[in-house]
Amino acid sequence: MASSSISALSLLIFTLLSLSSPLQTLSAASVIEDLNNLHPPPDFNTTISNNCKTNPSLKYCINFNPLNLPEIFKFTIVASHLCNESRNPNCVVSFPAINLQNRPKIAPLYLSFDFFWKYCPLTVSSIDLSNNSLKGNFPSDVFYCSQIQSLDLSQNHFSGEIPIQNFSVFTNLTFLNLSYNSFSESEISDSDELFKRFNASSFIHSGIIPDKRKFKIKALLFLTGFPVCVFLLVIFLWWICFSRPDFLPKFLRKKHKFTPSILKAATNGFSKKNLVAKSEGVRIYRGVLRDGTEIRIETYFDKIKFSREKRKDFVEECKVLVQLCHKNLVQVLGWCDNRRLRAVVTEWIEGESVEMWISRLDPPWKHRVKVLTKVVEGMMYLQEEWPGVGYDLKSSSILLSENREPLISRFRVEDESSCNKKVYKFGVLLLEMVTNRNPREEFEREEAGFVEWVRMHFPENMCSLIDEKKKRAEHMLDQATRSIELGLMCTDMSRGMQPRLDQIFEKLTAIYISILASASPDRKRVHGDRATGHRHIQSR
Ligand SMILES: *[C@@H]1O[C@H](CO)[C@@H](O)[C@H](O)[C@H]1NC(C)=O
Ligand SMILES: *[C@@H]1O[C@H](CO)[C@@H](O)[C@H](O)[C@H]1NC(C)=O
Ligand SMILES: *[C@@H]1O[C@H](CO)[C@@H](O)[C@H](O)[C@H]1NC(C)=O
Ligand SMILES: *[C@@H]1O[C@H](CO)[C@@H](O)[C@H](O)[C@H]1NC(C)=O
Ligand SMILES: *[C@@H]1O[C@H](CO)[C@@H](O)[C@H](O)[C@H]1NC(C)=O
Ligand SMILES: *[C@@H]1O[C@H](CO)[C@@H](O)[C@H](O)[C@H]1NC(C)=O
Ligand SMILES: *[C@@H]1O[C@H](CO)[C@@H](O)[C@H](O)[C@H]1NC(C)=O
């Protein structure tokens, strides 16, 4: 029966091959050309009927329908082309194999001819479509060739599920290769014939069978990776909470608390470039926080580790300092309290110290007095609101912002220095600003020596007390005299004669107003008054 079907097909193909000359040069283009141009011969009807009579097992004979004649004709065209393309030795006699290995250009074309596969010649016993970069789902049309013994679809890009159940039609299949494709992983159950009939070498890297080695590697990666990830996460969280809380969102951060790492990052690792001042045990750095805020960091280095007691005091102190808020006080932003590092962080003031300002610019009187009144304002705020807070009232530690706003810095909590002492210090500052002398550099007993020196020359020798340039303007002399008087009152601690801060403020304001007046257009009259006053002082 098989031999008769072969002869029937052969006959048909032979008929076709002898039909027209274009078939002599077979190619992908010619098969399409033939499909478009060839038409069933007038006796095709008869030929087919005869074929079916002699061999009813021909596929097109089963449920033969005359309406299918054009399709059957097309099938015969494709069959003859494909047989030859598959390099079968004698296509006139038989068509045993569809072999399109390494034919990526024509393989997809032949796969697309459904009408061919529908009537798949029963003579075909092997199909090889390997190594063609074929895409898409499993080519289900091959199931029409249920008689095949060998199927090779390896080295393509097929994807999706493979229809495992349909493989049962391949009762005579002895060779299968689906390796090197991208099929979806299939759930393999024991009832699947397919995996009993063919071993793993048919499914290498096909995607169908989960790769055991890959799975092992995945499992290993997971088993080691998970704890490592957890460990790293814990380390990361620990780091962020205890070392760099500035990476946390604002509401999670502890206000005012700075860690050594934050300060280190802000100052490029406490680099020399960021060091702005240095004295015994204290180093002052300029830094930039992550949010761009410029800060001034006062770090304290002690040789011995800070005791618990000492650290507690320090924190308590800083907790007070961050609450200070006045336009003439440097704003304390926070602190760092660590076994290795203690630091107070304040806002960065772009500007200079009053000491530098005086020596660099020799500012006019008016400005000096204005700065002094503002210092008193800051002092008054502290006395009223925070009497326990002390501060360093030196021309070198009072900072001057760019808009000439003086800012008291370097605070000390639970300062023993009394109010009197603070007024004394202010007196020294005032005298310093009038005389343009530096008490800490030019005098042997520093401030005390300086005050003594002023007292010695006042008022008889005013000229040696004040600056050459200032002497020229006579009204200046009067204001200078009044200022020195005030300064000496402040530094006079012996007789309890020190003025209160509000009194100092009033006096300074009065001096400031008189300076403004003497600088105004009707300065002549005022000038005259001052001149008299001056003469009075001189004659005393
Ligand atoms: C079949 O193909 C071969 C090349 O594989 C070619 O030499 C031969 O002429 C073809 N036969 C027919 C009948 O087209
Ligand atoms: C040929 O086809 C016609 C219809 O086109 C049909 O009536 C006739 O029976 C067919 N002949 C044979 C021999 O099958
Ligand atoms: C697969 O085809 C490529 C070219 O398309 C070729 O280089 C390679 O040798 C072929 N592999 C096999 C196993 O035939
Ligand atoms: C399998 O081979 C046997 C014997 O060669 C044959 O009888 C049977 O029809 C074949 N099965 C299919 C599905 O072609
Ligand atoms: C595959 O099998 C299903 C039933 O399991 C059937 O409905 C379908 O027609 C089959 N497909 C082919 C191409 O044989
Ligand atoms: C898989 O089966 C083939 C025969 O189909 C055999 O040659 C080969 O050795 C088998 N491989 C393994 C790993 O069992
Ligand atoms: C299937 O093909 C691949 C690659 O072409 C090959 O390594 C493998 O041995 C083949 N499997 C069988 C069962 O021949």
Image (spheres, rainbow, N blue to C red):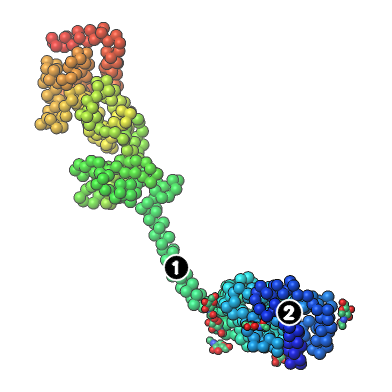
Q: Mark 2 packing: few (<14 Cα in 10 Å), some, or many (20+)?
A: few
Q: Mark 1 packing: few (<14 Cα in 10 Å), some, or many (20+)?
A: few
Tag 2, which secondary structure?
loop
Given the image, on which type of amino acid does mark 1 rest? Gly
Q: Are marks 2 and 1 in contact (CB under 8 Å)?
A: no
* Residue 504 drawn at (x, y percent): 26, 21
* Residue 312 drawn at (x, y percent): 30, 46
Whether residue 307 is situated above or below residue 225 in the rendered picture: above
Given the image, on which type of amino acid does mark 2 rest? Ser
Whether residue 135 is situated above or below residue 442 in the rendered picture: below
Judging by the rendered image, the residue that carries numbered circle 2 is 20
Whether residue 245 is situated above or below residue 146 in the rendered picture: above
Ligand 6 within 8 A of label 1's CB?
no
Report the quarter where the C terminus lies: top left
In screen coordinates, is 365 left or right of 185? left
Judging by the rendered image, the residue that carries numbered circle 1 is 225
| Residue lying at 75% horizontally and 81% vertically, measured from the top left | 19
